[in-house]
Image (cartoon, helix red, strand yellow):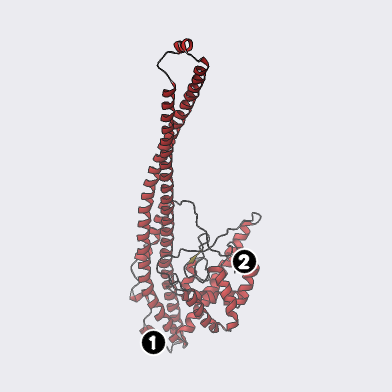
Amino acid sequence: MSDPTRTTAVPLRRGRAVRPLAAFLTAAALLAGPLLATPARADDYPSWQDVQNAQGDEQATQDQISKVGDALASTQQKAAEASTAALKAGQAAAAARADADAATARADQLTAQAEAAVQTAQQTHERVGTVIAGRERTETSSPLPVRLFTAAHPDQLLTRLGVMQRLDATWASLSARALAEEAVAASLRDQAQTARAERDRLAAAAEQAAQQAQAAADAEAAAAQDLQGHITTLYAQLAALKNTTADVERRYRIGQQVAEQAREQAAAAEAAAAAAAGSGGGSGGGWDGLGGDGVNVDPAGAQAYAAGQLGNYGWGQDQFPCLYRLWMQESSWRADALNPDSGAYGIPQALPADKLAAAGADWRTNGDTQIDWGLSYIQGRYGSPCGAWAHEVANNWY
């Protein structure tokens, strides 16, 4: 989901400034903390015995529905924390790798420049040697006064003396140039050495960040598997208490949460607009595939899943072309699409990214979960995909 402060998502071009890597790694380590927390105990969740005991008693049923709802909210929060930590760790790893690559390119460039400068200085020294040899051939062993009075052809001697003067001037000029070129070569060698040391440091930091990102992704996967099992059970319990189905309860709850998210976003937007009144502005950006490891990126599969879900929201297949264009423009239907400026994430570009947790614990890696959230958002905000697309065309966000 986009907002008024973000421009249409387009592929982000590389070329970022060097980042404070330590800040990325520290943030990733801190955010990974929730992943290592002790899993929720079984008695934190309502049991099937609790559900059965409540059936037939209206008040007990309502109390149990509230308990299940609270358990769902807690579980979704844990899922959001786990996946957000993995997402941030993936961003830090990608940024560290980009910095290391840039340092490598800089070191290579300076090394090549230093080698070229050394070669240039050597060529100048060779020219100095040639000039010295020419001057020696021009000189004779007789003193200048003797040559002036004994020369058979004084004009030739004066010509030779003029040649010597020019050779002396050339010698002096080339010697000065050679010294300057040697200084440039020495400076470039020092810079190249410093750049290589920085390259090695950043390469080690990138490897560390990659390991942290992988650890975060592994912890997230384990947490998501555990939490998703609890979520499935909780929806089944709700269905039993309310005499519906788990799918109906899930889609209803997603809709309720998305609506609440929209209300909160609208209030925040109004506050931001009031604070920015008169100052103008707004930030632009684009998406980049920086969602981290383990993301199932399958645009064709995502489109097929979305098309199959339209009927659950009361829409016909005539709405799919609008949905296709909307999310193609927003994310190219990539489940790992991340706007590095705003933080919008996933196929529907939810902002902030962890809103997607309302649809499932695997929101960071599963495009289908993201689509469930996105379709519910579109239904509540615009009524239909074509309504959302019309807003996108008119405002460059939805």
In the image, what residue type sits under mark 2?
Asn
Query: With 228 as the anchor, is 156 left or right in this view?
Result: right
Position of residue 395 relative to residue 166, above or below, is: below
Residue drawn where x is 46% and y is 30% of the image: 174
Q: Nearer the viewer, residue 358 or 17?
A: 17
Q: Which of 151 and 252 is in front in this view?
A: 151
Query: With 58 as the anchor, is 45 left or right in this view?
Result: left
Residue 2 in picture, x, y percent from top left: 56, 67
Mark 1: which secondary structure? helix
Residue 379 in picture, x, y percent from top left: 57, 77
Position of residue 319 relative to residue 219, above or below, is: below
Q: Residues within 10 Å of mark 1 (few under 14, many from 20)?
A: some
Q: Mark 1 points at which residue?
A: 52
Q: Which mark is residue 396?
A: 2
Residue 34 in picture, x, y percent from top left: 38, 64
In the image, what residue type sits under mark 1?
Gln
Residue drawn where x is 43% and y is 78% of the image: 68
Q: How crowded is mark 2: few (under 14 residues within 10 Å), some or many (20 or more)?
A: some
Position of residue 195 relative to residue 379, above or below, is: above
